[in-house]
Amino acid sequence: MSFINEKQKEINCKVVYFGPPLCGKSTTLRAVYEQVKDSSKGDLISLSQTDDRTLFFDFVPLSLGKFKNYTIRLHLYTVPGEVGYTAARKLISKGVDGVVFMADSQLQKMEDNLRSFANLREILKNEGLDWKQVPMVIAYNKRDLPNAVPADELRNLLNPNSVPDFETVAVTGQGVFDTLKAIGTKVLLNLKRKPL
């Protein structure tokens, strides 16, 4: 649910990068952060372990320009993918305006992808949201690996609603900005349908 700050004339929207452990959520946020102009972003805040596993969250605020004399701010978060962090995923996903589901393209990660997607649907349902109505895009990450499942098979498993999807390689930044633009557009279009 977007938050309107009347005093500063800002609309703050929350986008959550959701997916299984080690699928590339934090790496994607760092790649986005590197590609965005300094004047359009705030600080990257990361609470993670030294082995690059995010146990809490990563956060990047971005400015998307103006809408009805309000500055639009997109706040990007990652959630921890580990099974034991369901409460943290629920907390971070509260009030979400858009979701990027990050799938790990490796064959041995398909069960993790399906489990994580089911967890996302459950969290959204508990928030009173229909997961089919929430602005969403899907990123099939790690496309550069030799054991990556063909994208069409991933679509059949993880994209029943035919939302926009992208093949990404977070470590090189390939596709991550296209994914961000797509979710940003979907969030803004959804925002425009609602009265201020």
Image (cartoon, grey):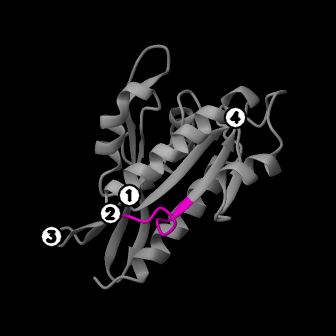
Residue mark closest to the camera, 3 vs 1:
1
Circles 4 and 2, Cβ within 8 Å, touching? The answer is: no
> Which residues, given as a range, are shown in magenta?
128-136
Q: Earlier in the sequence, mark 4 or mark 3?
A: 3
Mark 4–mark 2 distance (CA, rounded to whole Å): 37 Å
Q: Which residue is mark 4?
A: 172
Q: Which residue corresponds to mark 1?
A: 125
Relative height, residue 21 to residue 153 (above, below): above
Q: What residue is shown at x 63% (from left), y 41% (from top)?
A: 103
Label at residue 128: 2
In three-dimensional space, the C-alpha distance between marks 2 and 3, rounded to whole angstroms, equals 29 Å
- Number of the front mark, 2 or 3: 2
| Of callouts 1 and 4, the N-terminal one | 1
How far apart are the two marked residues, 4 and 3, measured between alpha carbons?
39 Å
Question: What kind of element bears circle 2?
Answer: loop
Identify residue type, mark 2. Answer: Gly
Q: In the image, what residue occupies the spot 44% across and 55% down? A: 40
Number of residues whose C-alpha sits closer than 10 Å to that of mark 2, classed few (under 14), some (14–19) or many (20 or more): few
- The image shows a total of numbered marks equal to 4
- Determine contact: label 3, label 1, CB under 8 Å: no
Amino acid type, callout 1: Lys
Q: Residue at x 27, y 68 (%)?
A: 10
| Residue appearing at x 59%, y 43% in the figure | 102
Residue 46 appears in the rendering: no
Q: Quadrant of residue 173?
A: top right
On residue 55, which mark appears? none
N-term mark: 3 or 1:
3
